[in-house]
Image (cartoon, rainbow, N blue to C red):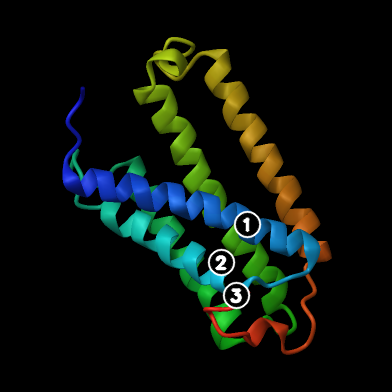
Amino acid sequence: MIEIPFLLQIHIILSLVGILSGLVVAYGWLTGRPLAGWTALFLATTALTSITGFPLPPFGFDPARVVGALSLILLAVAALARYRFDLSGAWRPIYVGTACAALYLNVFVAVVQSFQKLPAVHALAPTQSEPPFLIAQVVVLAAFVALGVIAALRFHPSPGGATLSPMRG
């Protein structure tokens, strides 16, 4: 069995929790419910995923760190829209768009890592330049673009609904 360093284990767990909680939050967008507790979990674990990725090798400013930095910027804007501006006016679609984009980046990286690390998937695209990798990434991107557009149109939480305690909903 492959030994995985502790920080990498934490990073992977945070990433998976971020993706799963983000999908629950996305369901809330589609049903018009803010799901405050799930939102707090999603934003926190997704931010921590990016933060814990920076000290992992290989070191230097590489594409993984660019994605991590971009994700942190998106999450900061989403958190401001959600918690500072209470999703009022233009902040509602800004929140949905930035949070959806951050979730997409987390899933994008999960797909990349799957093709790199999982033997069955790696065999389909060992250099990540083969059609199965491109198809997977295009499908994920298309799904998130559709999710973002539909969510921005549907997510209209009731007045005051966005200010629920982060531990509820």
Asked whether disc 1 touches disc 3, contact meaning CB atoms under 8 Å apart, the reply is: no
Res 3 → quadrant: top left
- Residue at numbered disc 3: 36
- Residue at numbered disc 1: 24
> Rounded to the nearest whole Å, what is the CA distance between mark 3 and mark 2?
6 Å
User: Of the residues shown, which amino acid type is indicated by label 1?
Assistant: Val
**Sequence-first disc among 2 and 1:** 1
Q: Is residue 69 visible?
A: yes
Left or right: where 108 falls relative to 91: left
94 over 118 or under it: above or below: below
Q: Nearer the viewer, residue 116 or 164?
A: 164
Asked whether disc 2 touches disc 1, contact meaning CB atoms under 8 Å apart, the reply is: yes
In the rendered image, the residue lying farthest to the top is 123
Measured from the top left, where is residue 161 in percent x and y? 72, 83
User: Of the residues shown, which amino acid type is indicated by label 3?
Assistant: Ala
157 over 43 or under it: above or below: below
**Sequence-first disc among 1 and 3:** 1
Q: Is residue 86 visible?
A: no
**What residue do we see at 41% from left, 16% from top?**
122
User: Of the residues shown, which amino acid type is indicated by label 2?
Assistant: Trp
Measured from the top left, where is residue 61 in percent x and y? 25, 47
Q: In which quadrant will I find the N terminus? A: top left
Res 126 → quadrant: top left
Measured from the top left, where is residue 43 in percent x and y? 48, 66
Left or right: where 101 falls relative to 154: left
Asked whether disc 3 touches disc 2, contact meaning CB atoms under 8 Å apart, the reply is: yes
Mark 2, residues whose alpha carbon is within 10 Å: few (<14), some, or many (≥20)?
many
Left or right: where 148 falls relative to 67: right
Q: Which mark is residue 38?
A: 2
**What residue do we see at 58% from left, 31% from top?**
137
Measured from the top left, where is residue 94 in percent x and y? 65, 70
**What residue do we see at 80% from left, 74% from top?**
156
